[in-house]
Amino acid sequence: MTSPSAAPRPAADTAKPKQVWRKRTASFSRWLHLYLSMLTFFVVLFFSLTGLTLNHAEWFDGQQVEHSFTGAVPAAWVNVPDTARVNKLAVVEALRTRHHIKGAVSDFLSEDDQCSLSFKGPGYSADAFIDRHNGTYKLTETRLGLVAVLNDLHKGRDSGPGWSWLIDLSAGFLALVSLSGLVMLFFLKNKRVKGILVAVLGGVVCWLLYWFLVP
């Protein structure tokens, strides 16, 4: 009695593990590079354009607008013997409500004769000086225009911890886009060597530009 012939093994079973790994890695790197590129498209565009505006800030001078306000807060909020007991929260909320102040409080100082506080935001500042004897104040609000707002967002200046986290995440995504593109290159046999040489050449050119152009 003859034994039945063994059934043919599927192609996936006969393929070498190394070849399967290479195929899956190449496929995943292409998928990752494509969708991360689309996900971070506007991030790359934003930081590219604001890099240009930062490098040529003189092109956008003259957009500063200042407004001055005067008023008074209840003297009891600030006219207290102990400067630590100044009602800072009430003062801040009163100024925000009356003058539609933006930004976060960056400084609140209580001295013998006056209190001074500053609000900071991207392309924005507001500074107030309050007489501690009678509660009268003078407030100066400065707006630097849309380009200044974008530049400060690029640098993460006065934009809050949430935006700082967004910058970190964007940097991580852009690093993954670059690395996934490099991984893809290693699976392109006809372009692998040339691509690596071009990448090395780009690094050398950047180093030479730094060496000769930066004082």
Image (cartoon, helix red, strand yellow):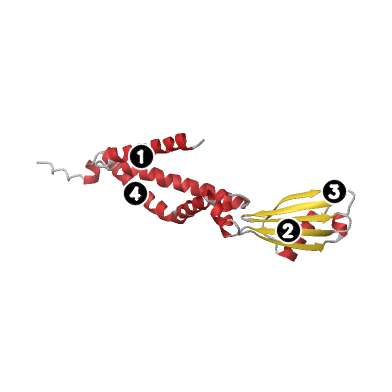
Q: What kind of element bears circle 3?
A: helix
Q: What kind of element bears circle 2?
A: strand
Q: What kind of element bears circle 4?
A: helix
- Residue type pointed to by label 4: Arg
In this rendering, would 184 be left or right of 89?
A: left
Q: What residue lies at 32% left-to-right and 37% top-to-bottom? A: 197
User: Label 2: which residue?
Assistant: 140
Mark toward the start of the polypeptide (2 vs 4): 4
The quadrant in which the N terminus is found is: top left
In this rendering, would 38 be left or right of 109?
A: left
Q: What residue lies at 57% left-to-right and 59% top-to-bottom? A: 146
Q: Residue 83, labelled with which disc?
A: 3
Mark toward the start of the polypeptide (2 vs 1): 2
- Residue type pointed to by label 3: Thr
Q: Nearer the viewer, residue 144 or 42?
A: 144
Q: Residue 32, labelled with which disc?
A: none
User: Label 4: which residue?
Assistant: 30
Please provide percent x and percent y for residue 174.
45, 47
Mark toward the start of the polypeptide (2 vs 3): 3
User: Label 1: which residue?
Assistant: 199
Please provide percent x and percent y for residue 117.
75, 53
Task: Mark 1: give few (<14), some (14-19) or many (20+) Cα within 10 Å.
Answer: few
Mark toward the start of the polypeptide (3 vs 1): 3
